[in-house]
């Protein structure tokens, strides 16, 4: 049986045949750091189909508006330009014009159409882009782009803001004697509670994939991965996931492809998104813990998600996680106000496999075991509502003084 090979810390996009990348420093940040990479270019000479998911925030950054328009145009597409240090959000008509100019300039330099490029930004909201610096950076990115691992690493580093490390992954598998790839890069550490579909993720594959099938595959993967993480409960103005398929392998995958190939491709896209999502939540701003919140036995999928998010975003719960205090009463409280169907007398709560409550009755004698469990960097909390078969899994973090200090001022 064909196995997926997952490389969590790869070179990213340049692992996919036919894709080039660049990462350059052009001093886009308000707080100057001339050595920090802040502009990335991902490029395929071959035309690509594309899919994307975007923030549902009513306040959408200019590049999000541009990307949705270009995606609706239908392609073909050739690449993505992304800057860090400035979100180009809440910048009015001038911000949208700047995003258009970015697409026009990169397209002109490569003799392509502006609609063949996506433009993304991440960073501080409400500041105009320093366009002269950005446009000079584009010139350098075009001249310096390449296919090596170093090019891929630089592109992954150039999109970071408060992240502490680049986030990359490559998933590969062999089908009919040929090796295929799905690879990606991402950024995100704060303002993280995506609902798309500040986080960005860019994926690429060497398959030829019809637009509708690519969109369906990506949307399903995003729903179960990027949309199932939370750091601080804040949805960004710039959240974007884009995927490009350049057909370099000469193999097509779509609705009429053999089932095995369709399943393998979908699993590869899901796994790439899953790894990147985990990297984002694990790199949350100044966190010390990552907690898997599992809700089972809910009356509906909606109820399961409501309970998980109520727990994962509760300031009281997150504070107790940071304090390594197994305060399961806060879990029960959050579950109770989530707006889901819940019967206290049926509720089970577990830390890993150790029960804190069974059918509404607490296990006070097991408190020493709970206390040991919550000292770990990662642990699992499970709530079984015993009201149905629906479930939901959320990755959440603790809330620390470091997070408050980091975000309290400019």
Image (tube, rainbow, N blue to C red):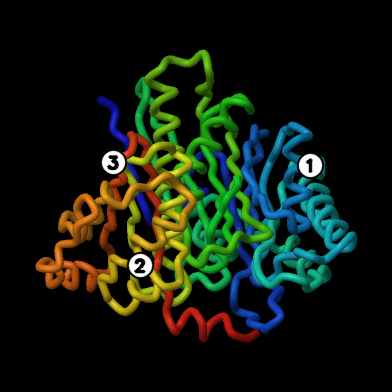
Task: Give the secondary structure at mark 2.
Answer: helix
Q: Residue at x 48, y 41 (%)?
A: 302
Residue 310 picture quarter = bottom left
Q: Residue at x 51, y 13 (%)?
A: 256
Q: Is residue 236 above or below residue 401?
A: above
Residue, disc 2: 330
Residue 273 shown left or right of residue 74 in the figure = left
Residue 123, given in percent of the width and then of the height, sits at 66, 69
Residue 25 picture quarter = bottom right
> Disc 1 versus disc 3: distance between alpha carbons?
45 Å
> Disc 2 versus disc 1: distance between alpha carbons?
44 Å
Task: Give the secondary structure at mark 3.
Answer: loop
Can the viewer see residue 312 in this picture? yes
Residue, disc 1: 69
Report the residue that reaches farthest toward the left.
365
Q: Which mark is residue 301?
A: none
Q: Residue at x 41, y 17 (%)?
A: 259
Residue 403, given in percent of the width and then of the height, sits at 48, 79
> How many marks can you see?
3
- Marks 2/3 in contact by CB < 8 Å: the verdict is no
Within-10-Å neighbours for mark 2: few <14, some 14–19, many 20+: some
Can the viewer see residue 11 in this picture? no
Q: Nearer the viewer, residue 373 or 208?
A: 373
Q: Is residue 71 above or below residue 20?
A: above
Q: Which mark is residue 386?
A: 3
Residue 330, given in percent of the width and then of the height, sits at 35, 67
Q: Residue at x 21, y 50 (%)?
A: 359
Within-10-Å neighbours for mark 3: few <14, some 14–19, many 20+: some
Task: Give the secondary structure at mark 1.
Answer: helix
Mark 2 and mark 3 lie on one chain; the one further toward the N terminus is: 2
């Amino acid at each position: 049986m064909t196995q997926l090979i997952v490389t969590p810390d790869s070179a990213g996009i340049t692992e996919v045949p036919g894709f080039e990348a660049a990462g350059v420093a052009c001093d886009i940040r308000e707080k100057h750091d001339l050595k920090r990479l802040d502009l990335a270019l991902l490029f395929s000479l071959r035309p690509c189909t594309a899919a994307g998911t975007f923030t549902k925030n009513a306040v959408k950054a200019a590049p999000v508006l541009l990307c949705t328009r270009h995606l609706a145009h239908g392609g073909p597409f050739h690449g993505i330009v992304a800057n860090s240090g400035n979100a180009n959000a809440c910048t009015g008509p001038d911000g949208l014009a700047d995003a258009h100019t970015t697409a026009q300039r990169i397209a002109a330099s490569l003799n392509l159409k502006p609609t063949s490029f996506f433009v993304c930004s991440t960073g501080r909201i409400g500041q105009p882009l320093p366009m002269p610096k950005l446009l000079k950076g584009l010139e350098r990115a075009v001249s310096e782009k390449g296919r090596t691992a170093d090019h891929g690493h630089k592109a992954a580093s150039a999109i970071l803001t408060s992240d502490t490390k680049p986030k990359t992954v490559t998933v590969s598998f062999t089908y009919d004697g040929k090796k295929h790839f799905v690879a990606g890069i991402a950024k995100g550490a704060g303002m993280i509670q995506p609902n798309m579909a500040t986080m960005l993720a860019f994926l690429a594959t060497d398959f030829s994939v019809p637009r509708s099938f690519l969109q369906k595959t990506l949307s399903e993967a995003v729903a179960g991965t990027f949309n199932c993480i939370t750091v601080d409960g804040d949805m960004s103005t710039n959240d974007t996931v884009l995927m490009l398929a350049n057909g370099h392998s000469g193999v097509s995958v779509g609705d009429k492809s053999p089932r095995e190939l369709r399943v393998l491709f979908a699993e590869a896209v899901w796994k790439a998104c899953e790894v990147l999502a985990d990297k984002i939540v694990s790199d949350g701003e100044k966190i010390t813990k990552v907690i898997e919140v599992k809700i089972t036995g809910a009356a509906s999928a909606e109820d399961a998600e409501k309970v998980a998010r109520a727990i994962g975003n509760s300031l009281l719960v997150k504070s107790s996680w940071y304090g390594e205090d197994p305060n399961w009463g806060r879990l029960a409280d959050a579950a109770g106000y989530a707006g889901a169907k819940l019967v206290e007398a049926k509720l089970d709560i577990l830390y890993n496999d150790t029960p804190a409550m069974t059918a509404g009755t607490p296990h006070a004698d097991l408190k020493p075991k709970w206390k040991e469990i919550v000292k770990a960097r990662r642990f699992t909390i499970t709530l079984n509502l015993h009201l149905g078969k629906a479930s939901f899994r959320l990755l959440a973090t603790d809330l620390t003084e470091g997070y408050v200090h980091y975000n309290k001022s400019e």
